[in-house]
Amino acid sequence: MRDQTIAHLFGAGHDSDAFLIAWTVPEMASTLLIEDAMALLMVPAFSHALARRAAGRAGLTRREARVQDPVRLLVGATLPRLLVFLALVASVLAVAAPAVVAVLAPGLPDPRLAVECTRLTALTVLSFGIAGYFSAALRAHRSFVPPAAIYVTYNIGIIATMVTLHTLWGVRAAAAGVAVGGLLMALVQLPSFVRHVGFGPPRARRSAAPRSQRDRDRPTLIAFGVIAPVILFAVFRQSQVLVERFLAASLPSGAISHLNYAQKVAQMPMVLSLMICTVTFPVVAQAMAGGEREKARRRVERDLALASLAVLMGTALVIGYAPQIIQVLFERGAFTHEDTLATAAVMRVYGLGLLGHCLVGALSRPFFSTARPTWFPAFAMGAGLLVNVVAGAFAVRWWGTYGIAAANAAGISTAAVLLLTGLGPRIIAIHVRTVAVSIGRLAVAALAACATGWIAGPMIPDPLLSAGLGCLLVPAMFGATGMAIRALEVTALPGQISQLTQRFRNAR
């Protein structure tokens, strides 16, 4: 709905390009401060603190347990420093907005509008940091509803601000909406954070805990040598967007917008598939903390299978029915039919990298579930980014936006292969060959379903009806092909659904 509103009000031209350049700041902040770096650092930190809390409460009074609570000591040691640091970074970004825009999009004809929007979106560095910290703490406590609500409130803030102020501020209203939405992301989690976690023991009581206990419970994850691999991994991963917009800035007006709309829609299957890993990440982290490596291995292999099934089925749909989906979602207002055709073509190329995006998100979590994350994920993402940069710089000259999207797919797929082959020897001894064969069979089923949708889609003139029928046809063909080639995840799915339904009934 957010992207539909942006497309309707501002189309795909200079104004939307300027806003999307400014939107690079919150996109990078989201990756670092909510989804990747913050979660990969703080979910294990809170999981380890919870494990120490459970082991250390025996024989303590309620007051002593509160004063020596590792979770509260963790909050007291990290949150204040984080707030000061992020406020400083946000201020620097706002002041240096002209230089930021010049680096992100050096070929932009008129950067003034992008600079104004960047100063507004820079505020999200602070609000996203708070929201990400709250989310990590709540996920470790197995509280998932408030973290899930952050993007709902974020997008409500953006949409409401745009609708209210776009006639006065133009596309600046979208940037202001990003700032408003970021604030709402933190506020919607605040009550649950206070209830489940708290803000640390009172300052006067902190000295009551033995010094050795306080030193042990202060997170060693905050040392630079430990957080650097996580931050570098997240920066490399998000830098793919920077590369795309850098290369597209010199293309005709609207190229950045076409890439953005195509990427947002194409990545929906990846986002949905990674919900599985988001929920089970604390389980893996706590299993690793307790030395239960076999349990962690089974969980990781199951996550990879289910996530791959979900993303490949979604990939078949977005590639097969790309023109119909884009037409239904965006073709109204300032978004023309030519924009639909250009965006759909780019989205089909982006779809080739969706499995890679999913595997990178799923495989990176086990690497960071231990007390001391390794450098290997950063190395893998760095190699993928290098492939993206080199291939994109070459391909953009010949194929424009299609070359940029293809380079993105090649880079993320390279990183995914490296992570898959590197996980077993370094962290969890997963059966790489078995996982690869399973994913290969699912890919064959996805190819058959995609070809069916590509052929059947244009046969029905009405795009809404065509896309709606595609939502039935593609999964049916995916399932039939998976059954025929004996893809284990497909053949076992009915039994898993039945088991899940039975558990739900028992829980009720």
Image (spheres, helix red, strand yellow):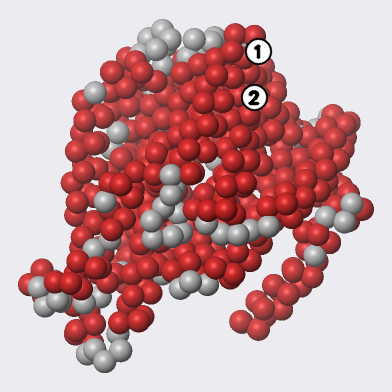
The quadrant in which residue 345 appears is top right
Marks 2/1 in contact by CB < 8 Å: the verdict is yes
Q: Position of residue 275 (x, y in %)?
A: 57, 55
Q: Which mark is residue 216?
A: none
Q: Few, some or many C-alpha atoms within 10 Å of disc 1 (few <14, some 14-19, many ≥20)?
A: few
The amino acid at mark 1 is Trp
Label 2, label 1: how far apart the Cα atoms are = 10 Å
Q: Which mark is residue 399?
A: 1
Task: Pick the residue in front: 358 or 221.
Answer: 221
Q: Few, some or many C-alpha atoms within 10 Å of disc 2 (few <14, some 14-19, many ≥20)?
A: many
For the C terminus, the image quarter is bottom right
Work out whether mark 2 precedes mark 1 in sequence or the reverse, and give the earlier one: 1
Seen in the picture, residue 495 relative to 444 is either above or below; the reply is below
Q: Residue at x 49, y 53 (%)?
A: 367
Side (left or right) of 137 relative to 60: right
Task: Pick the residue in front: 225 or 395.
Answer: 225
Seen in the picture, residue 27 relative to 349 is either above or below; the reply is below
Q: What secondary structure is marked by label 2?
A: helix
The amino acid at mark 2 is Ala
Q: Residue at x 68, y 47 (%)?
A: 311
Quickly name the residue at label 2.
406
Side (left or right) of 435 relative to 44: right
